[in-house]
Image: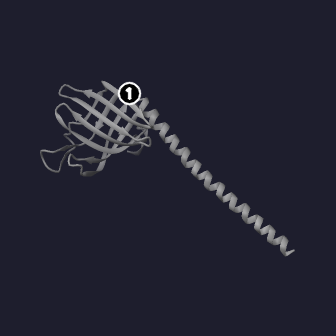
Amino acid sequence: MKNLVFIFLVLFSLTAANAQENNEKTKSELKAEKKAQKMEDIKFMLETQSFSFEAMQIVKRDKSIVSLMDYYLVKVENEQITTYIPYYNPAVENQLEIENSPFNFTRPITEYVLEENEGDFTLRIETNNNEATFFFNFQISKYGHATLKVSSSNRRCISFKGMISKTDEFQAAN
């Protein structure tokens, strides 16, 4: 009888251990599926020209980084680009131009060039107004992390680090 109880306990523990391994495998599979879906979403947003970029940091010319505490974005939708991002004025040390930033506007997109390289993306957007032509150059990872370099025909380049997301997600969050 003792042998029968012992065999039953051994079989039960092996079954429980096997079930636990299957649960861990399922978790990793779910994580992989979630990453794959995120990659598909990023590609779809970029191809359909409908996304937002939330700027979280400015990368200054000397490569130092300034974290942004407020909400700054570039939104691409309906063949237009809407920007609300600060300009770091190198002529006046440590001054962010926010309210009078030359990069606060909504304009039609004149050029949209998207290239994919091993799951990552390079995107170039061009627009203009009466005073200048603006260039938005994005480097976007397959998971939505992005670097944006903004330049114009009459301003120095400024770089941002941030995230790409669906436009409605940003509207709902703010």
| Residue at image point 19% right, 25% down | 130
Q: Between residues 101 and 132, which one lies in front from this camera angle?
A: 132
- The part of the image, by quadrant, that contains residue 171 is top left
The C terminus - image quarter: top left
Q: Position of residue 56 (x, y in %)?
A: 32, 48
Q: Residue at x 71, y 62 (%)?
A: 16
Q: Number of callouts in the render?
A: 1
In the image, residue 15 sits, relative to residue 58, either above or below, namely below
Dot 1 alpha-carbon crowd within 10 angstroms: few under 14, some 14 to 19, many 20 or more: few
Quick one: SS at disc 1? loop
Tell whether 164 sits left or right of 72. right
Q: How is the image coloured?
A: one colour
Residue at the disc numbered 1? 78
The kind of residue tagged 1 is Asn
| Quadrant housing the N terminus | bottom right
x%, y% of residue 19? 69, 58
